[in-house]
Image (cartoon, helix red, strand yellow):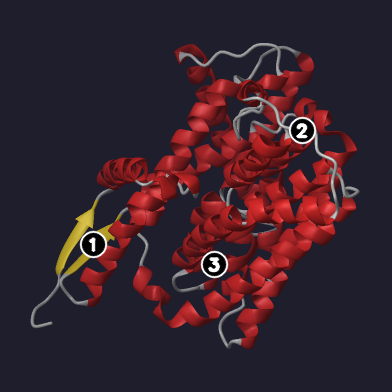
Amino acid sequence: MGGEALLIKVSSVQAVALAFVTYYIGVWIKSKFITLQKLSLPSAVIGGLPFALILSILRVYGILTVEFDNALSTVALLVFFTSIGMMASLKLIKYGGMALIVYLLVSTVLGFFQNLLGMSIAGAMGIDPHYGILAGAVSLMGGLGTSAAFGPYFEETYGITGATTVAITSATFGMVIALVLGGPFGEFLIKKYKIATPGHHSDDDTHLEPHVYDMSILEEEETTDVNGTLKACAFVFLAVGLGAILSSYLNELITLPAYIGAMLVAAVIRNIGDFTGKYRVQGGGLNVISEVALTVYVTMAINSLKLYELVNLAGPLILILIGQTVLMILFAWLGYFLLFGKTYDGVMLGVGGIGFAMGATANGLANMQALAEKYGPSPRAWLIVSLVGAFLIDFINAIIITWMGAW
């Protein structure tokens, strides 16, 4: 526009600092608007997307170009997924029984069909089918975390322009739609099938339902202090180091995201401790580590989004996401609900599935909580959705995405 755009290069340390600034701006904005709180949108999205939009507009008009060094986001990504792997305790999984296994299998099939549908629509619209995967299981079943991980992976491996932007935009869309549809869909099932419900319970009962990542209610003791967090941190970074070695060998056989090796090593470390009793991985400490790492790397990814890359993809992306929404409703109805016997647990598993399979486990639990306040709790469904959505599906989803991406 009459002169060369000003170029600003943001170092990796500065990028982390900026991530915390935009995150807490998001926290402040969210506290002022009740609608944003009801939608359970992450503060990283609320603070980061407007920032990314401003930078994109400035770049398009040739005023300012900002280049981010996101090297430290890779470390945060590895730490987050490693902490998730370290939560994969077989002793916890047994509490869900066969219902948990079935729910995990159904969710796996859904992830496959999300990719298949996305690829089909993308191909029909004349764009690279990889965009269909990004607007499929990467962003919806995977959520913001997987989007921020696989976006750069698709850009580097398959040369997909704007992959991270497409994935994170789709994940944000999915999170909003899941919260809008979840409660009404549950009401529809209860009324249509005249489902017997456990009845309304007082607010005092809600403490029985755990935090999305907190499985400590199933363990004998739990402390979240400096020593516990430091101990969990030591286990996580040990797994990251050993996982890098494992990933180097795995990549000779198949191309996988960098965090897969660390997740596998973390799961082994966790279960050796659980079954031998020689050491104990602190669940509370893992919660702290995973949430800090997730906040840092997702906010860094959102801050550096190149939203202008969506201009030529807007039409196809909208059609793909509409198709994904229809698929989710059909799957929640014909899959989760009918498969689990038209029961109240089935209703809860359906609305919970809409939440975590469209962007975030926390949204699935929010959908379930909304129904529980009116009709009563479903502890079994809450446990299953927490275990599957919080970490089990991440293992399988990464394999599905990598496999279908190589088609």
User: Seen in the image, is 204 located left or right of residue 102?
Assistant: left
Q: Residue at x 21, y 69 (%)?
A: 58
Task: Write down the quadrant of residue 278 in the picture.
Answer: top right
Q: Position of residue 118 (x, y in %)?
A: 65, 73
Say which residue label 2 marks: 199
Which image quarter holds the C terminus?
bottom right
Disc on the earlier residue, 3 or 2: 3
The residue lying toward the viewer, choosing from 97 and 69, is 97
Q: SS class of the residue under badge 2? A: loop
How much space separates mark 3 and mark 2, taking CA atoms? 52 Å
Q: Which residue is mark 3?
A: 157
Q: Nearer the viewer, residue 45 or 183?
A: 183
Under mark 2, the amino acid is: Gly
Along the polypeptide, which appears first: circle 1 or circle 3? 1
Does any portion of residue 210 appear in the rendered image? Answer: yes
* Point 79% across, 19% down: residue: 275
Q: Which residue is mark 1?
A: 66
Alpha-carbon distance for marks 1 and 3?
A: 24 Å
221 relative to 112, above or below: above
Q: Quadrant of the N terminus?
A: bottom left
Residue 8 located left or right of residue 339: left
